[in-house]
Image (tube, grey):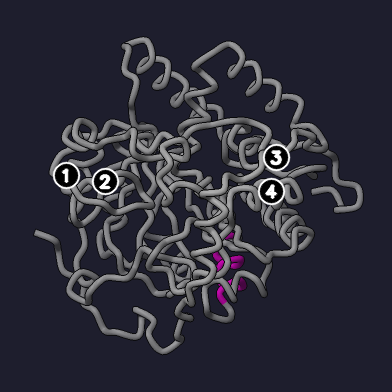
Amino acid sequence: MEPRNRAKLGIDMGVPVSQMWTVASYVLKERLSGRKRYPLVLMLEPLFRCNLACAGCGKIQHPVETLRRHLTPEQCFRAVDECGAPIVSIPGGEPLLHPQINEIVDGLVARKKYIYLCTNALKLEAALPSFTPSKYLSFSVHMDGPREEHDAAVCREGTYDIAASAIKAAIDAGFRVTTNTTIYDGVQPERIRDFFDDMMELGVEGMMISPGYRYEKAPDQDHFLARNETKTLFRQLLDNARKWRFNQSPLFLEFLKGNYQLECTPWGNPTYNLFGWQKPCYLMDEGYCETFAELMATTQWENYGCASGNPKCADCMVHSGYEPSAVDATFGSLNGFWNTVKLTLLGPPKRSTKPLAAPADRQAQELKLRRDIPSAKPSPTTRPDDIPLPLINDR
């Protein structure tokens, strides 16, 4: 990579052509069939147990008996086949703690699904011999900024160095590697921009970035962003971009900066986990369905998204709700397609000039109310990995 002081302007797309073609063909087929709501990425959570207790995470707060359980490979395959999405993201918990994760991955590769195996990388380097490099498999490594910021976000020192070493080892072994970065209030934009440079120097295929979602169960409630705060911060992060590669739609990146309007499509990233198909989305837990068809037919989708007035959705700009919207916008009109092509080939404008809309009084009051409520601080003595939990199948 060129030195930072000579870095070229523009943002490269970090998505392989074969994957782009698969997604484009799938979306066009769904649209031509007249299907208005279709899944793009299946969020497959095979377990909730993790070996970290991140301050902003709201996914691992479950009873011990739940943390002991995991989905079988057969359950995972059934969900993937039922959903039909071309991409499968495997979050958690920490997927590498699953005793049959390699069998799950092999089964999805055989189905020609593009897989993002999300991991904090603490066990990645040791696990590499269990996997086979494939264009269908990408390790999506959780990296929340430079060393100091990342270690603080995951509440454990030394994790950045372990993850960086694992990234290099995976790339050297021939694997696809991307990073997944959650942005919170209080970060220093220039340090995050330098972090983007560092990831490019490590050789990752592309980066994924997103503002954090205000999980009700997250230990730290003080550093989530309001909607206009997100747009302002992402303008500081992405305007005058250096030669970075993002594994995301360019329309979604413009949406984060407030330059493009998108509405949430929660059905685009459906979630399947130990409890079934989660309503309505990956971020909110308001019930479960036994089948994917039931999820699509019975969820009152009009009650969700920023336009619905649902206060839980007011500040959300997370990729799981809006990346599918960006892809749909690309193929939904000539204007959307042209904007995507233009952003991909020419890069985004150097500076965002579109005025930010003033937040609605309701949103401002909701934000003030949330910030006036004291939040519990994460305790280093209650990490899930401190509890000996033998994994057992969920039957």
Question: Which residue lies under the disc numbered 4?
Answer: 234
Report the magenta stretch's main SS. Answer: helix
Asked if residue 28 is positioned above or below residue 297 in the image, the reply reads above
Mark 3 or 2: in front is 3
Q: Nearer the viewer, residue 82 or 162?
A: 82
Question: In the displayed structure, does residue 194 sit left or right of residue 267?
Answer: right
Which quadrant would residue 38 be assigned to in this image? top left
Cβ–Cβ under 8 Å for marks 1 and 2: yes
Give the mark nearer the N terminus: 4 vs 1: 4
Give the mark nearer the N terminus: 1 vs 3: 1
Q: Secondary structure at mark 3?
A: loop
Q: Position of residue 353 (x, y in %)?
A: 79, 34
Residue at 50% over, 64% down: 369
Q: CA distance from mark 2 to mark 4?
A: 29 Å
Give the mark nearer the N terminus: 4 vs 3: 4
Question: What range of the chain is rendered magenta?
Answer: 159-167
Which quadrant would residue 22 be assigned to in this image? top left
Give the amino acid at mark 4. Phe
Q: Position of residue 144 (x, y in %)?
A: 59, 63
Give the amino acid at mark 2. Lys
Residue at 49% over, 32% down: 263
Q: CA distance from mark 3 to mark 2?
A: 31 Å
Mark 1 or 3: in front is 3
Q: CA distance from mark 4 to mark 1?
A: 36 Å
Question: Which residue lies under the disc numbered 1?
Answer: 289
Residue at 33% over, 38% down: 303
Asked if residue 314 is positioned above or below residue 266 in the image, the reply reads below
Give the mark nearer the N terminus: 2 vs 4: 4
Question: Which residue lies under the disc numbered 2?
Answer: 279
**Which label was assigned to residue 59?**
none
